[in-house]
Amino acid sequence: MRTIRLLLAEDQSMVREALAALLGLEPDIEVVAQVARGDEVLAAARAHCPDVALLDIEMPGRTGIEAAADLHRELPGVKVVVVTTFGRPGYLRRAMEAGADAFLVKDAPASRLAAAVRTVLAGERVIDPALAAAALAEGADPLTQREREVLRAAADGATNAEIAGSLHLSPGTVRNYLSTAIQKLAARNRAEAVRVAREKGWL
């Protein structure tokens, strides 16, 4: 029986250790690396050569979706399973676009996670069925990449000038992106636009 080498990325140490312990009980899975930040995933994957990376979405440094895109681009042989506490349809769509092979809600039993790891290694995709149905009902993310970046920066309370400086845009361009995003999300202001985008999993 072949042993599956697994990289585990989760910022909450208790959750990460519990997952590592549970998955380590599987006879064919070995957790070869654990990281707490999304920006540590690629280096850990290069160092430990996992077959599968299990990534949480909400992590410091880089999100699990961004880390999935890094792996897909740099180490396409590594299969990616994205797990999240938040069953937001937009997350599913973005994870699949980033090259994830599986998307599961974190409250799935360890046996289901282990089965997903084996399934993606066999070349198949695994998607939480309830989330898949919700994503279809929700429709596509209307925001462009730039609109998402500007909204994300605005979420921290930055002014237009500060956002412009951090994203190398003019303040007028930032204002236009914010205005368009607010319109697309049928929001009254930037704070509401950020809230709506986050609830949908688009941010």
Image (tube, grey):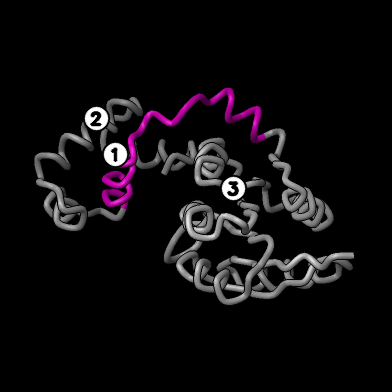
Residue 147: image tag: 1
Disc 1/disc 3 C-alpha distance (Å): 23 Å
Disc 3/disc 2 C-alpha distance (Å): 29 Å
Q: Position of residue 125 (x, y in %)?
A: 70, 41
Residue 100: image tag: 3
Residue 83: tell me if it is visible. Answer: no
Quadrant, the C terminus: top left
Vertical comparison of 155 with 134: above or below: below
- Local SS, label 2: helix
User: Residue drawn 32% across and 29% down?
Assistant: 187
Magenta stretch in the rendered image: 131-155
User: Residue drawn 57% across and 69% down?
Assistant: 45
Instruction: Tell me which amino acid carries mark 3.
Output: Ala
Residue 63: tell me if it is visible. Answer: yes
Residue 180: image tag: 2
User: Residue drawn 23% across and 37% down?
Assistant: 178
- Local SS, label 1: helix
Q: Position of residue 182 (x, y in %)?
A: 28, 31
Give the mark, 1 or 2, whose residue is nearer the N terminus. 1
- Local SS, label 3: loop
Q: Nearer the viewer, residue 50 or 33?
A: 50
From the viewer's perspective, is the residue at label 3 or at label 2 nearer?
Answer: 3
Disc 1/disc 2 C-alpha distance (Å): 8 Å
Q: Main secondary structure of the magenta part?
A: helix
Vertical comparison of 174 with 137: above or below: below
